[in-house]
Amino acid sequence: MKIRTLITVRGKVQGVSFRYFTGHQAQALGVTGWVRNLPDGRVEGCFEGDEAAVTSLVNWCGHGPPEARVEQLSVSHREYLGEFRGFLITG
């Protein structure tokens, strides 16, 4: 089953390559979507793909790369749209 999940990560998640490593994990898992920094210091992402792969990526975002300190991970599920061709790292 294909799913779409939105995440917001709070903590020390900017300036620690969180987006880069999220993109690397997404590509390894075959997940499409995007990840970006928010002006308030959080990181936001939208992931689409097979349920197991998206769940694995979301779980990874719960701790992030070695230098990150995740304080809170917010997750919401949406209707799968299949709108992405790859994975984009922005902002």
Image: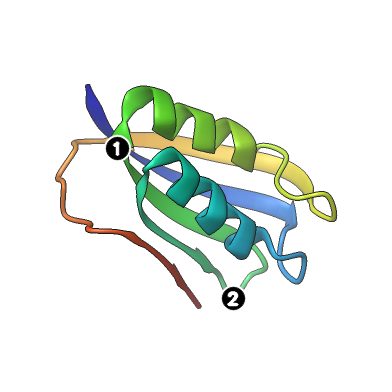
Image side of residue 44 versus residue 13, left or right = left
Residue lying farthest front?
28
Looking at the picture, which amino acid does disc 2 mark? Answer: Pro
**Whole-percent x and y of residue 52?**
40, 23
Residue at left 33%, top 33%? 77
Q: Is residue 20 above or below residue 32?
A: below
Residue under label 1:
49
- Label 2 sits on a secondary structure element that is loop
Looking at the picture, which amino acid does disc 1 mark? Answer: Gly
* Front tag of 1 and 2: 1
In this view, the residue in front, 20 or 77, is 20
Query: How many marks do you count on the picture?
Result: 2
Q: Are marks 1 and 2 in contact (CB under 8 Å)?
A: no
* Quadrant position of residue 76: top left
- Label 1 sits on a secondary structure element that is strand
Other-residue count near label 1 (Cα within 10 Å), few / some / many at <14 / 14–19 / ≥20: many
In this view, the residue in front, 74 or 90, is 90
Q: Which mark is residue 39?
A: 2
Residue at left 22%, top 58%? 85
**Disc 1 to disc 2, C-alpha distance:** 27 Å
Image side of residue 91 versus residue 87, left or right = right
